[in-house]
Amino acid sequence: MKKFLLAFAILAALTACDKTKQPNGGNKTPDNPSTEVTQEVKKEALVKYFELNSSLTVYQALEKIKSATEEKTIDGLKIKVNSVTEESRNEQTGVLTVKIKGTVDGKAFEKSVSFDGFSKKPTDEAMAKRVTAKWKADADYLKDFDFDALRLKETAKFNAEYMAKFVTLTSSNHEGSIHYEFTPEDWAKTVISDIKYTAKSNHDGDITFTVTYNNIKGNT
């Protein structure tokens, strides 16, 4: 009998303790619930926040989006982006989709957004065969480019990594309506070969080379 009463007392104590922890038989609501996604921000406001426009390539747009972290007031809302994750991109159609986390007027938001209308990238064949080159506007090539090595036909150093410091490559589609500038990602797929300097005079000459893009060899 004593054993029965002792077991009953223990059971009653445990039941009372359990009810204290879980009133009404359910889970107790945390005192400090996690922050809920409570705010919405329109795509148009994010376009203004990131300062996006149709002259950008998908790559350039993504770099711009990732670098924007300061708080800005857009259409009366205080917007701050905390993180950006790339979800997909299509450079041929000029579309970029990213997941954005941040705050609007101090309230958290999370949104997947597809930005479109960016400069479209030509096909790989056009990238190789419809490419033009010009000196970079901010490169002091007359001082820093190694013309002497090129004149001496010492061409080992003139690879894509070296040329990217001095030269801008631009490709176009077959209609000529798209003019697309090579990005660092494009330069990584580029091979420079058959480079040579042909003198016209003592102080003038031509530099020619062949571009191979993504294993497709173009013209000189």
Image: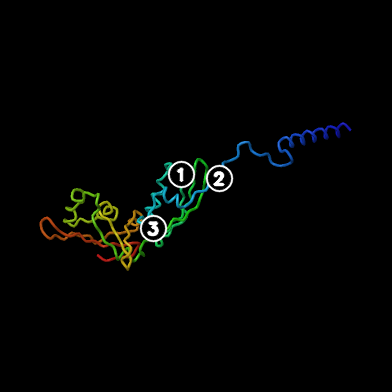
Q: Which of marks 2 and 1 is in front?
A: 1
| Residue 141 placement, left or right of 43 | left
x and y percentages locating residue 38 in the rendered image: 55, 45
Residue at the disc numbered 1: 76
Of 199 and 20, nearer the camera is 20
Three-letter amino acid code at the position of disc 2:
Thr
| Residue 11 placement, left or right of 161 | right
Residue at the disc numbered 2: 38
- Residue at the farthest right position: 1
* Among numbered discs 3 and 1, the one appearing first in the sequence: 1
Residue that appears at 32% across and 68% down: 175
Three-letter amino acid code at the position of disc 1:
Gly
Residue that appears at 47% across and 52% down: 43
Q: Residue 118 carries which label?
A: 3
- Disc 2/disc 1 C-alpha distance (Å): 18 Å
Element on which disc 1 rests: loop
- Residue at the farthest front position: 76
Please, is residue 11 above or below residue 93 in the view?
A: above
x and y percentages locating residue 65 in the rendered image: 41, 49
x and y percentages locating residue 30 in the rendered image: 64, 38
Please, is residue 192 above or below residue 22 in the view?
A: below
